Image (spheres, rainbow, N blue to C red):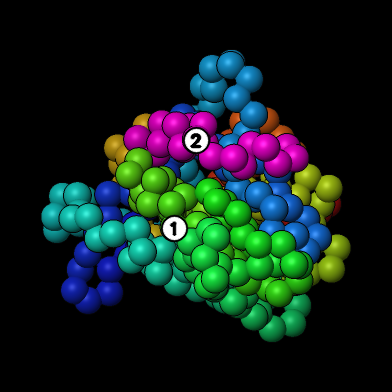
Amino acid sequence: MARKPRVPYRSWPLALTASAVLLAGGCGGGGSAEGDLGKGTQDGSETTESFEPPEPTKAAVDPPHGGQTPDKGWESEAEDAVAVVDNFWSAHWNDHFTGAYTSPTVFGTYIPGTAEAPSCGGEPAVPDNAFYCTTDDFIAWDAALMSKGYEKGDAWIYLVIAHEWAHAVQNRVDGLAVEAAELQADCLAGAALYGSADLQFEDGDSDELGAALTELADDTPWTNSRDHGDAEQRINAFSTGGSDGVAACLPE
Ligand SMILES: [Zn+2]
């Protein structure tokens, strides 16, 4: 996906469908900083689910550069992703919830083991993770996790941030989080990314993304966390949010 350019026009080679959009892994609940976004359990079965993006509801912007963009760096992509997701929730908060929307703090990048790395609930941030800290209301991600994922495509950056942001949303609304909180976060991530007026989805990147997520997931420790859904369930959850929006992710 690509954040729609302001001025000057820029475009990104992002993509989001996925033969396997795996935002999995257990997510830490409570005040812990334990592994969050992670991959779903790879049970060896071929995941053939494909994400069907919703029909565009806005005129597609025609990228002047053929949809391919220069590598702008994952840090810059992360800044864009934060803006995109924050803007989405700010714009749509009252479509679904009462009260005023507040953004979580974005701690952003950390390097595990350094003095600057954040702790959450007394637990230090761990390598290859991204998480939302419930107790201190911030989002953070390991630089290595992002840079590694970015090698496979910039969609990864957006997915990680949208998913973690969804946990902040869950923490803001009493009664919102369902038992399958990870799947709900995947659903909300899909809703935010596909519902964003700031993002432009381009054709042709989906396979790359699906492969990237799958490969990346295999290298992350996230799967060590409690699982709340297998790969297919996660893809379905993400797709549901992407296709049907936030309302489809809320408790019945
Ligand atoms: Zn999570």
Which of the two discs, 2 and 1, labels the residue nearer the N terminus?
1
* Type of amino acid under label 2: Asp
Task: Give the label on residue 143, or none.
Answer: 1
The residue segment tinted magenta is 208-227
Residue 73: image location, x then y, percent: 28, 59
User: Callout 1: 10 Å neighbours few (<14), some, many (20+)?
Assistant: many
The outermost residue toward the bottom is 100
User: Callout 2: 10 Å neighbours few (<14), some, many (20+)?
Assistant: some
* Type of amino acid under label 1: Ala
Task: Give the label on residue 219, or none.
Answer: 2
Magenta run includes residue 215: yes
Residue 127: image location, x then y, percent: 55, 51
Q: Please, is residue 95 above or below residue 100 in the view?
A: above
Magenta run includes residue 88: no
Residue 174: image location, x then y, percent: 84, 68
Residue 188 or 211: which is nearer the viewer?
211
Which residue is painted at 27% across and 74% down in the image?
A: 6
Which residue is painted at 62% across and 60% down in the image?
A: 125
Can residue 232 be seen here? The reply is no
| Ligand 1 has an atom within 8 Å of the beta carbon of the residue at disc 1 | no
Residue 171: image location, x then y, percent: 75, 67
Please state the total of marks drawn on the protein image: 2
Q: Please, is residue 230 above or below residue 136 in the view?
A: above
| SS assignment at label 1 | helix
| Ligand 1 has an atom within 8 Å of the beta carbon of the residue at disc 2 | no
Which residue is painted at 34% across and 58% down in the image?
A: 74
Residue 14 vs residue 101: left or right?
left
Mark 2–mark 1 distance (CA, rounded to whole Å): 14 Å
| Quarter location, residue 234 | top right
Residue 187 or 44: which is nearer the viewer?
44
